[in-house]
Amino acid sequence: MACKRGALIVLEGVDKAGKTTQCKKLVQALELSGRPAEMMRFPDRTTTIGQLISSYLEKKSDLEDHTVHLLFSANRWELVPLMKKKLEQGTTLVVDRYAFSGVAFTSAKPGFCLDWCKSPDVGLPKPDLVMFLQLNPSEAAQRGQFGEERYENSTFQDRVQQRFEELMKDTSVNWKVIDAAQSVEDVHTNIQNHSLNTIHKAQDMPVGELWK
Ligand code: FDM
Ligand code: MG
């Protein structure tokens, strides 16, 4: 390898856990310490597929449940060439949601099993680290009301949380559970420590394939 590759770092968690805030702070901190880093988020609402997803989430359109699941997955796959390029160039990617949200949200719907939900994402670039921002529902509720988008209600979010717990039993994925009830700064320090450790370890290893 001409240069050391970047790490693929994912933040997951239920609504209001602080994923977006923490992704931004992590990218900033890495950049400040001279480590190239960029943030990505899924769904990426800027692509053609992303616009279909966005309109579905905003309840401006309805899509059949399997169909929308596959669109979320396609939205990841369409960005894989770019992700691989960035990683090879030595840029660490900090990603706000990934295939784990995909599986947790769809499998929280009636009639969907974990295995079916995972299959379209099998073989995606495997994150070197997945941090799950853990926040119990009552603490999440104190952080304010849900918005108007699809899935933003506590019954559904409870089911999503259960599905994440199922996914976290998979030891082939490098999960770290982060207590998101701490202060923003304490959560950040925690996340930064795990990330630096991961960036160091990942640089000499090829990017893996998820769920393979
Ligand atoms: N979501 C997100 C899914 O249902 N499947 C996916 O694959 C992904 C990445 O979309 F409710 C859901 C999770 C959340 C919504 O919200 C996206 P944000 O606020 O843009 O992260
Ligand atoms: Mg949201």
Image (cartoon, rainbow, N blue to C red):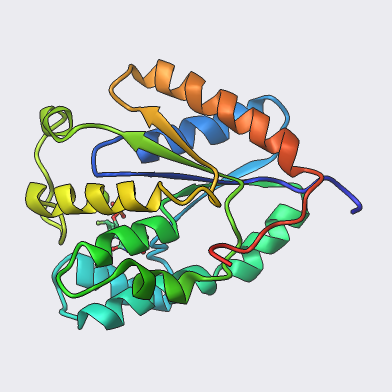
The answer to which of 41 and 165 lies nearer the viewer is 165
Residue lying at 41% horizontally and 78% vertically, measured from the top left: 48
Residue lying at 13% horizontally and 49% vertically, measured from the top left: 147
- Residue 8: where, in percent of width, then height? 61, 49
Residue 18 visible, this orientation:
no
Q: Quadrant of the N terminus?
A: bottom right
Relative side of 104 to 123, left or right: left
Relative side of 127 to 200, left or right: left
Residue lying at 46% horizontally and 23% vertically, measured from the top left: 188
Question: Where's ligand 1: which quadrant?
Answer: bottom left
The answer to which of 153 and 165 lies nearer the viewer is 165
For residue 144, which quarter of the picture?
A: top left
The answer to which of 17 and 57 lies nearer the viewer is 17
- Residue 49: where, in percent of width, then height? 39, 77
Residue 146 visible, this orientation:
yes
Relative side of 200 to 56, left or right: right
Up-down relation of residue 164 to residue 65 (above or below) = above
- Residue 41: where, in percent of width, then height? 44, 54
- Residue 110: where, in percent of width, then height? 14, 70
Residue lying at 21% horizontally and 65% vertically, measured from the top left: 57
Q: Quadrant of the C terminus?
A: bottom right
Q: How many marks?
A: 0
User: Residue reaching furthest right?
Assistant: 2
